[in-house]
Structures are given as structure tokens and as C-alpha cells.
Amino acid sequence: MKQWPRALQQLPKLLSPLVLLLKPLYQFFMLMWFLCFKIPAPDVFIVQNPPSVPTLVAVQWASWLRRSAFVVDWHNFGYTLLGLSLGRSSRFVAIYHWFEKHYGGMADGALCVTKAMQHELAQNWGINATVLYDQPPEFFHPASLEEKHKLFCRLKNNIGSPCGVRDCVSMETLRTSNSDSNDSLFTTQAETDISLKLNRPAIIVSSTSWTADEDFGMLLEAAVMYDRRVAAILNEDDSVEEEVIWKSIYNGRQYLYPRLLFIITGKGPEKEKYEEKIKRLHLKRVAFRTMWLPAEDYPLLLGSADLGVCLHTSSSGLDLPMKVVDMFGCGLPVCAVSYSCIEELVKEEKNGRLFSSPSELADELLELFKSFPSECNSLKLLREGALETGLSSRWATEWEEHAMPLVSEVISRHYNKFSKAM
């Protein structure tokens, strides 16, 4: 499909109300052309929501013209996402809400991603939905030692490039790159034998779209607290320069608490702002890397990491973060921001931990990574729970058990209605 012209994306903010009207119209006619003329008539249209405007309107009209059934897959409420940028009191948000509720209610069937959303749709929208939990694709799985080593070797340059001048990871990565191509920061290879280094940093992964519904500042504050609390626990003098600590780590010394390497993946509008904040941090045991990985490397990174962090809070409070589902598919435990329905996915003490403040996240990091990597019993139990969650159900199973019966019923009911009409 042809996209909204790029030249019109650069219009002054003064004309944004006009764009909010013209862009959906352009997309509506483009969708109608494809749905009504470019593809064969389907038995059923399944449309993910959001976006709601103009998608729900276009699919409703196309299903009527082509005598097809129409199912909405509710992943969130579009008007709440629009409210993040325009404010909930905006007239455009109110109009969007009306379109979403009116045309969403005209569907022949509905799927949704949480029980909390199912309840909201039933109570306030008059829609009976079937819960279909997101599941990870098959290529999300724990990485083997060989896969980890190859990935870390490929990412040497990325990991060795600090956001600031230097940090606890870049100094060692530079020496490793210069000394031995069979070594990475985390692994070492002798002939065909690969092993993990005992004094390696712990890898914490967070995937983000760098938008307003994820408070990345919370993670930065928690990192600073971790760094300071470790120094206090170890009775380190503030006058000790970080390079002295880094040199002792490089020479093989293991501390009670490890270095933490936060790898943040994704693109988005607030990325540069937070990268500038990271540059101003001067931490002894924490480093940050922002990356955009090839599609084949992202699952490997999750499968090679020690912990995932999710900062998603949901614009509606009723959806679940897909990134956590993918992490569980790789057997990666998660620390997630607590909100109304997150416990449908993240189970305390089973596959992850929940936090509500930077201080709570710092506490979790101190508990989980104490004596890393040898004696982290709490982290090991969470990893086992995450792997069990990831293996308990896959997409094909979830579809066959929950979605397929609904779709079959909708198609059958739809054709019976048209048969009687004829």
C-alpha cells in the first residue's frame, strides 16, 4: 500500500488538525481499494485494534460489501494511545473514542489479550470477547553456549562503544579485541571448548519504543542507586577511581556484586534525549548500550541475557507487553513495572518480579545478582519459571484452543444469516 506522502509529514504543527483529518481519509480509500478490489473475498476479516481509525471503519464497510464476517482482535484501545500525545480531554480523542466503540461493536466476533480487557469490553462497550493471550514464535528460545559466543563476538564493536567517554565495559572490551579474537567480554574459546567467564558482566535487556508510555528515567535512576549501594556495601572510598576497580576486574578479581550491562534495543522519538542523560552518568559498575539489532539477532540476545526489564505501563492499563512474552519464550526472567493487569503475565517469585519505583528495581537487582554468576539461587528459580511459562503454550496451541473455535462459529453464523436472507 502507498503510504501517507513523506512531504506532508513535515508540515508545520499549525496544520496538524488538518493532517489529523486528511491522513485517515487517505488511508481509508487506500484500504478500501485493497480490501474490496485487490484481494479475493475472504470468509472473514480479522483486524487488529489499534489502530482504530480508519481501519475499523474500512474493514466494516468492506465486510458488508463483500459479505464477509468481521472479527476485531483487541490489543489495546486506540483512543488511549492518542490521548498520550493530545491529552484525554482533546476533542479528537473523543471523536476517535466514538469511532472505536461504534465500529468495534459492529463486529461479528472479538478477541482480546487480557481478562481485564475482556471485562472492560463486556461492562462498558457491550462486546463479548474471547481472551487470546499473545505467545512467542518458535524462534524465541534459550541460546546455546555456541550461539552466545558467536553473538557476543559479532557484537564486539557495539558493546565496546560506550554512550559516554568510557565505562566498566568499554575498557575491557578494548583489551579483549586487541588480545584474542576467540574471546568476547562474556565468553572464551580454547580450540572447540567454549565457556562463560566468571567475572563477566550481567546482561540486562530492555526493549523499548522510546515513547511516553515507558518511563526510561526510572531505569536510569535504578542504575545509579545500584552503583551507589554496591559501593556502600563494599565500603569503597569515594576517592577510589573507577579505573582502579576496572583494572582489578580485568585481572580476574570477582566482587560480591557484578557489573551490569544494560542493552537497550529499539528506536523511537525519545532515544536521543535519554542517550544524552546516559552520557552524563559516571558509574563504576553499570554501563549502557543502545542498539538496533537485525531480526535474527534479537531472539539470540534475549536467549543470552541474564534478566529482562520491562518499563511498559499501558495507555489503557488493560494490555500486556509483547516484549515480555518474547523474553519468556527465551527463558529470560523479567522485572516489570507494576500496573493493573501485568500479573496475568508476570507472576511474582515464579517468572519475574514487579516494581513501582527506581528504588524497588535497585533492590531487586541487588538481591538477584548477589554472588553472580555462581550462587544466584533466586535468579535461577525465576529463569526456570520463565522457561516453563514460555514452553507451556505456543502460538499454534493458543490459536487452536481459543481463536479457531470463535472464528469457525462467526463464519458459520454469518453464512447462516445470509442463507436465510436469500
Image: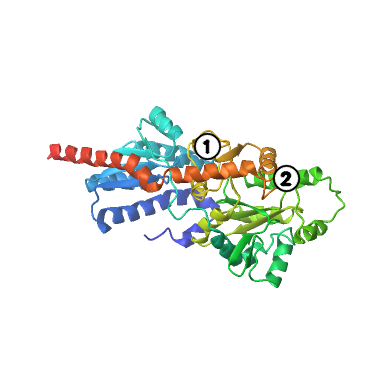
Say how many tags the image has: 2
Residue 54 visible to an observer of this rendering:
no
Q: Quadrant of the C terminus?
A: top left
Residue at x 62%, y 57% (from the top left corner): 290
Disc 2: CA contacts within 10 A as few (<14), some (14-19) or many (>=20): many
What percent of the width, then of the height, locates residue 117?
Answer: 44, 34
Q: Is residue 232 left or right of residue 142?
A: right
Q: Which mark is residue 228?
A: none
User: Callout 1, which amino acid?
Assistant: Ile
Position above or below: 99 against 42: above
Image quadrant holding the N terminus, namely bottom left
Q: Nearer the viewer, residue 376 or 62?
A: 376
Label placed on residue 342 = 1
- Mark 1 vs mark 2, CA separation in Å: 25 Å
User: Residue 55, position in %: x, y?
Assistant: 37, 47
Name the residue beneath numbered marker 2.
226
Depth check, front residue: 8 or 368 = 368
Amino acid on which the number 2 mark rests in the picture: Tyr
Along the viewing direction, whichever of 265 and 174 lies nearer the viewer = 174
Is disc 1 in contact with disc 2, using a CB cutoff of under 8 Å? Answer: no
Residue at horizontal 68 percent and vertical 71 percent from the top: 180
> Is label 1 in a helix, a strand or a loop?
helix
Whichever of callouts 1 and 2 sits on the residue coming sooner in the sequence is 2
Residue drawn at x 63%, y 56% as measured from the top left: 272
